[in-house]
Image: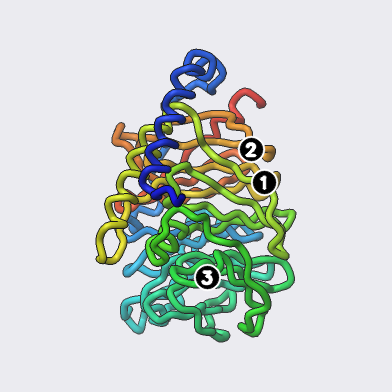
Amino acid sequence: MRIRVGLRRRVFAVMCLLAGMCAGVAARAQQPEEVDLSAKQRILPAVGPGLRAVRQGADGRLYILASPSPGLVVVDTKGKQILSINEMPTAADSATASHSLIAFGEDCDVDAEGKIYVADRGANLIRVFSGDGTPLHSFPVKNPVSLAALPEEEIAVATLREPHLVMVFDKSGQEVREFGDPEPISERADLNRFLNIGQLGTDAQGHLYYAFGYLPEPTVRQYDHLGYAGQDIQYTAIDALPTAVAMRKEIERQEQKTKEPFFRRVLTGLGVDHSNGEVWIALNNNLLHFDAAGNRRATYKIYNPQGARLDANTILIQKDQLIIGSDPLGLYLFDRPDKKNTK
């Protein structure tokens, strides 16, 4: 006998609730303490609405993408803008090199040699630029939503619709492999693929991290650069259960409709410590820190210097600081709370 998907979900939710109630006291005792974390200051105040990504090159430069304006902005280690690759026309006598070459950027990254990659969803292209902003080439990818530079000049791309989670292209733009099967959350194919949309990150060991934006239980999956899956980092504490149950109810509701799926993100931001593979994720204004083994080390509520909550959508992990971005509030600098007691 075939059990309906909705019934399975209700049984699952009840089982989770009962298990959580039975283990609630012990779980709360073992969970890391939740701490408020306030930003030191806002940086690059010209960047705000449309903020998509912040990355850092090997030379310390910051690469910030905001769509539709100002596009991709590059600043040096002192915070001075040295390059812009724009989505809107700029004055011909601009003090910095400017190029109106991006239709609508969703994500960006920079490789060890300083080449810049932009996922241009408005043009269905991956655009490649030299370190000074000169266009090198582009190649077609339908609906790219995230990308990450890999070793050996390869680029990993996540999309909206492709059968696998990740496509990998070589330096000439030829697809060399794809990997990652979507999680079976819904029996409706288009809705299930939407629920598996994710963000990409990397570490110095060449691992690729795929953060599922819409799974009921926030999940980050680690792959090696060839596509072999490693561990899953998943947040399943008792306080995450109400969100997971509500998300499953919304999935069941939308399964009954024929409209394009639309959900609010559960996991809104991903940051990977490049040096050691520790993972930081944002669930709106909740910031969770996991060690390389997948153990949750801390949970923070994040705020700007004026006390307003920050719903993070991009996270950059630096040695002693965090740069956290929120659309439309902009970019904010935080001291790394895990480093305070080690100095």
Q: Which mark is residue 231?
A: 1
Estimate the spatial distance between the alpha carbons at disc 1 and disc 2, rounded to whole Å.
Answer: 8 Å
Q: Nearer the viewer, mark 3 or mark 1?
A: 3
**In the rendered image, the vertical position of residue 128 relative to residue 269, given as above or below:** below
Going by the image, does 113 lie left or right of 106? right
Q: Earlier in the sequence, mark 3 or mark 1?
A: 3
The structure residue drawn at horizontal position 66% and vertical position 74%, both measured from the top left corner, is 177
Q: Give the x, y percent position of residue 13.
A: 41, 35
As helix, strand or loop, the secondary structure at mark 3 comes to loop
| Residue at the image position 51 percent from the left and 78 percent from the top | 126
Kind of element beneath mark 1: strand
User: What mark, if any, has residue 279 been given in the picture?
Assistant: none
Between 94 and 71, the one lying in front of the other is 71
Q: Which residue is mark 3?
A: 163
* Relative depth, front residue between 34 and 192: 192
Task: Indicate the position of residue 163 as horizontal and vertical percent values.
Answer: 52, 70
Residue wearing tag 2: 294
**CA distance separating discs 3 and 2:** 27 Å
CB-based contact (under 8 Å), mark 1 and mark 2: yes
**Image point 50% across, 57% down: which residue?**
199
Q: Considering depth in this image, is 261 or 70 the residue closer to the camera? A: 261
The CA span between labels 3 and 1 is 21 Å
